[in-house]
Amino acid sequence: MIGYYGGSFDPIHNGHVEIARYIAAFPAVDSVCFVPTGTHPLGKPVSLPRHRLEMIRLAIRGIPGLTVSDIDVSSGVPSYTIELLRRLKETVKGKFFFIAGMDNLNQLFEWREWQQLLSFPVVFTSRAGIKPDRCAIKRISDIIGKEIPRVEQLVAEVSEPVILTVPDVNISSSQIRKMILKGESPSDMIHLDVLDYIERHDLYRKG
């Protein structure tokens, strides 16, 4: 079973890597693949795909069970999660699940075809400082016909949306971008090779 970890990863940080390693260590999981988004559907500015892909490669280099895919950034169209999941269903051989953060659960109703998205195995991960919205839980539970399960680990194939408790790592990409913009170094939050890449390509230094 492969976990596909979606997000902008702008930039990827130690929290992303820690969560991916944690999930990849479950016996039922073969690997975790980072899938950076391409063009943001709501027009949110993100760094060029080639930068984000390379930063992910640098951050996970040498870590067993972690990979990266350009399946979303190579599509050339605005990225909607439901369309990515449909492409994965068509192309992935075997079982897979999609990994999204708790902030995504709380904002799920802003997503295209969010009801259909819940027909896929989506693992919403816990996040420090963000609690699941009660209204969101109620609406999701109504769609799937029961309260969304909350689990401590993935012990078998994921067939429905679940909330997975993962280690708390209080880091965000937006926090890192703000620090770099102010001339501060987030060296304890991201891989040093990623930080070097950011400096060499002058990323996040313009507001």
Image: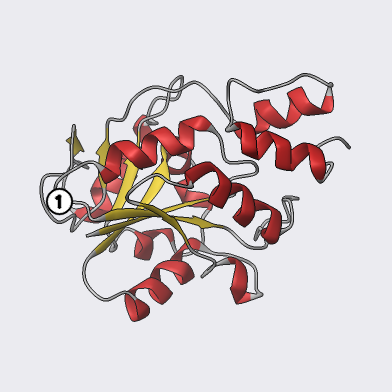
Which element carries disc 1, helix, strand or loop? loop
Residue 203 visible (yes or no): no
Q: Is residue 137 left or right of residue 206?
A: left
Q: Which residue is more in the foreground, 67 or 148?
A: 67
For badge 1, the amino acid type reads Ala
Q: Is residue 55 left or right of residue 30?
A: right
Q: What residue do we see at 61% from left, 73% from top?
A: 74
Q: Which residue is more in the foreground, 62 or 35?
A: 62
Q: Percent x, y for residue 43?
A: 73, 56
Mark 1 surroundings within 10 Å by alpha-carbon count, few (fewer than 14), some (14 through 19), many (20 or more): some
Q: Relative to residue 54, is residue 20 depicted above or below?
A: above
Q: Is residue 7 left or right of residue 134?
A: right
Q: Percent x, y for residue 97?
A: 29, 58
Q: Percent x, y for residue 177?
A: 73, 32
Image quarter where the C terminus lies is top right
Q: Is residue 28 left or right of residue 40?
A: left
Tell me which colouring the rendered structure shows. secondary structure
Q: Relative to residue 196, is residue 47 depicted above or below?
A: below
Image quarter where the N terminus lies is bottom left
Q: What residue do we see at 17% from left, 52% from top?
A: 145
Residue 196 visible (yes or no): yes
Check disc 1 and report the residue beneath it: 28
- Say which quarter of the image contains residue 165: top left
Name the residue furthest front.
62
Q: Which residue is more in the foreground, 44 or 174?
A: 174
Q: Percent x, y for residue 32?
A: 35, 52
- Say which quarter of the image contains residue 79: bottom right
Q: What residue do we see at 14% from left, 56% from top?
A: 157
